[in-house]
Amino acid sequence: MTFVAVLPRRRIRLKESRLNDEAGQDCGSPAQYVDDLAQKALQHRAVNHPYLHAMATGAFPSLHGALADFAQHYHGYSAHFPRYLTALISKLENPDHRKALLENLMEESGQYEEEELLELKECGVQPEWITGFAHPELFKRFRNAIGVGDSTADHDHIEVVCWREQFLAILNTGSAAEALGALGLGTETIVQTIYQPFVAAINQLGSLKPEDAVFFPLHTAVDDHHQATLKAIASDFAATAAGRADLTKGMRKALALRDSFWSWLHERAMAGHVIHDSNGSPQDPADVRTH
Ligand SMILES: [Fe+2]
């Protein structure tokens, strides 16, 4: 084998060893490592993005337009959440890990334990608003209430299709630890925080009924224990340097993808060309699907 052919492999090994060294240098407990990673996720730009700040303060040419545009496009990522969770579950060899995440999957489909419903009621979420409604249905309810009509995945914008496919690729082709880093630390850990600006924007708009926007308070409450479940599983993978490296890698990839999607939405919202008609159809021809 020539040196040229060997070089890329050497580079890959070097990269891997750097990543493993970084993960291995941390001498804390696996749970501590996961807690530290979760903190890093919360400090990432995907969680502190100017788009989220603008959403929280209503600093757009049209707050309704920005929310409607978010509703239209985020759906193409969010509606596929059960697929993401299923992909992660299929990677896990430990039956206890799978069982814990299957409970999360049940909630995603609108089935809750009595205790959970009581807790949610205390947060102002009425059981009849959510019981029997899969979470993508709840997002669709919000979407319709803000004036965006139903559409199939065939009509998703190429930007959201890219996000969804790249995210699924991490879950399907990465190791179990990497998939867990992406969906657990890089997603569930931040959901509670990133949905708060949308709650603020919806309140500021003041035209939606609470049951129509229940998707958001539901996630700021429910995902609290989803987060805990995923962090507990991640701790089992954080017992080795390789596991730590893969958790970190998955988390960073997921956050980078979200950051990039927020930037795209931010640019559109600031351009203010995303006002929808009464059917939810974009009025600007530039919005028409490009793939
Ligand atoms: Fe959900």
Image (tube, grey):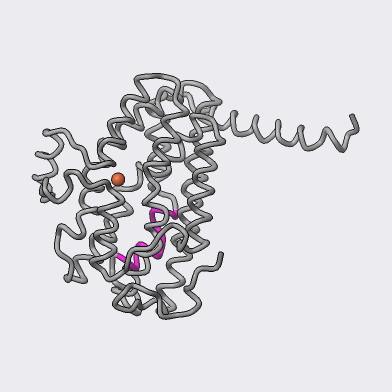
* Residue 29 visible, this angle: no
Identified at 45% across, 29% down, the residue is: 90
Horizontal side of 170 relative to 28 (left or right) equals right
Residue 115 relative to residue 168: left or right:
left
Q: Residue at x 54, y 42 (%)?
A: 169
Left or right placement of residue 161 versus residue 73 in this view: right
Residue at 11% of width from left, 48% of height from top?
128
Q: Does the magenta-highlighted stretch encompass residue 47?
A: yes
Vertical placement of residue 85 versus 258, above or below? above
Q: Quadrant of the N terminus?
A: top right
At x 55%, y 26%, the residue is 242
Q: Which picture quadrant has residue 99?
A: top left
| Image x and y of residue 276, in percent | 35, 76
In the image, 133 versus 142, the foreground residue is 133
Give the quarter the ligand 1 occupies.
Answer: top left
* Residue 199 visible, this angle: yes
Is residue 28 shown above or below 44? Answer: above
The mark total stands at 0
Q: Position of residue 21 (x, y in %)?
A: 59, 29
Height in image: 178 above or below 94? below
- Whether 163 is drawn above or below 20: the answer is below
Residue stretch in magenta: 45-55
Left or right side of 242 for 131: left
